[in-house]
Amino acid sequence: MKPQKEVKISGWAAHTTTGVSVTLALLTLGIIAMIWIAAAAETKRMMEKIEISVVMADNIGDDRAKAICDAIEKTKFAHNVRYISRQEALDNWKEATGEDLEHVFGVNPLSPEVAFSVDAGYSTVARIAGIKKSLAAIDGVAEVGVPDNALIETMNSNLKKLTFGFIAVAAIMLVISFVLISNTVRLSIYSKRFTIHTMQLVGATDGFIRRPFIASNAMVGAIAGVVSGGVLSALLAASGTMGFEQIASLIDWKWMVLVDAGLIAGGACICALAAVIATTRHLHQDYEDLFK
């Protein structure tokens, strides 16, 4: 009966296996991060749909009305400020209702208006009430129209619940990914436990033994981060041609660069930390325990 040959796995093969596992885990984290960015952008877009209209007094002149519009445009709470002249307001009314008010009254009864959307940071009931009060105090403003408070509170409440739910899911996925990466690194170092023990016997310090394991696994994690970041960036670049234009519009490339950098740094740090934990465990093992 022929003796069985011991199958040895090369260092490159072990690192490749570890790299593939880490890449898949980082891809999961990257997808979660991209969904988070898209959700945050969509949340901001929804919150900035709140629109306020400022109706001018009947006797106000065009110059004064435009001056008020310019002043509103310079504020921090206003976005997409639009000036609606008397004639434009009349045309809009005629287009919406089919009724010619100028023919009915003999004159144009409508006043100029300024319409704008509220910045996401000001889309609360209290802040909108403050905006309404400050605008109503401007000389020449007859009325300030704001959305119903109940509508704003309902929208903000739903968005907060969605945000908290997403944070919980992201935290769980982060823990799962760390455990998977840690186990993968631990298994790769487990095969070198006898080497670690031999280095201890010849007088190598704990730091000297840990250093190559930390460096090699950190490099594997960084490379896995580069690969996962490249895959996600390629998917984002191709999303427009694949019929996902809306997703592409929600994720700015500056955020994608930050995600890629985070995956590279996170992969290196997680793998290095897992290597520290795994090597420390074997450094404190008795010789008999190495066979378990």
Image (cartoon, rainbow, N blue to C red):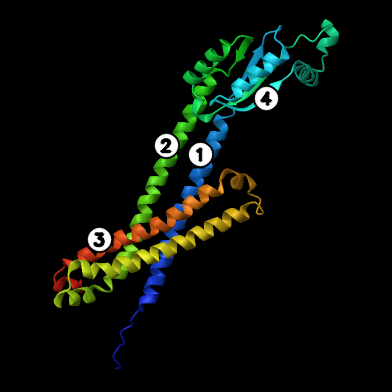
User: Mark 3 and 2 residues: CB-CB less than 8 Å, in contact?
Assistant: no
- Residue 38 screen position, x and y as percent: 53, 43
Mark 3 and mark 4: Cα distance apart in space:
60 Å
Amino acid of disc 4: Arg
Of callouts 1 and 3, which one flags the residue occurring earlier in the amino acid sequence? 1
Q: Are marks 1 and 2 in contact (CB under 8 Å)?
A: no
According to the picture, the residue beneath numbered tag 3 turns out to be: 277
- Mark 3, other Cα within 10 Å: few <14 / some 14–19 / many ≥20: some
Mark earlier in primary sequence (3, 4): 4
- Is the Cβ of the residue at disc 4 closer than 8 Å to that at disc 1? no
Q: Is residue 105 left or right of residue 80?
A: right
Label 3 or label 2, whichever comes before in sequence order: 2
Q: Quadrant of residue 98?
A: top right
Residue at left 43%, top 38%? 165
Left-right relation of 43 to 178: right
Q: Amino acid at mark 1?
A: Ala
Q: Which mark is residue 40?
A: 1
How much space separates mark 1 and mark 3, taking CA atoms? 35 Å
Q: Earlier in the sequence, mark 1 or mark 2?
A: 1
The residues bearing labels 4 and 1 have C-alpha atoms spaced at a distance of 26 Å
Q: Which mark is residue 82?
A: 4
Q: Assign a secondary structure to mark 2.
A: helix
Task: Choose mark 3 or mark 4, whichever is in front.
Answer: 4
Mark 1 or 2, closer to the camera: 1
For the C terminus, give its image quadrant. bottom left
Q: N-terminal of the two: label 4 or label 1?
A: 1
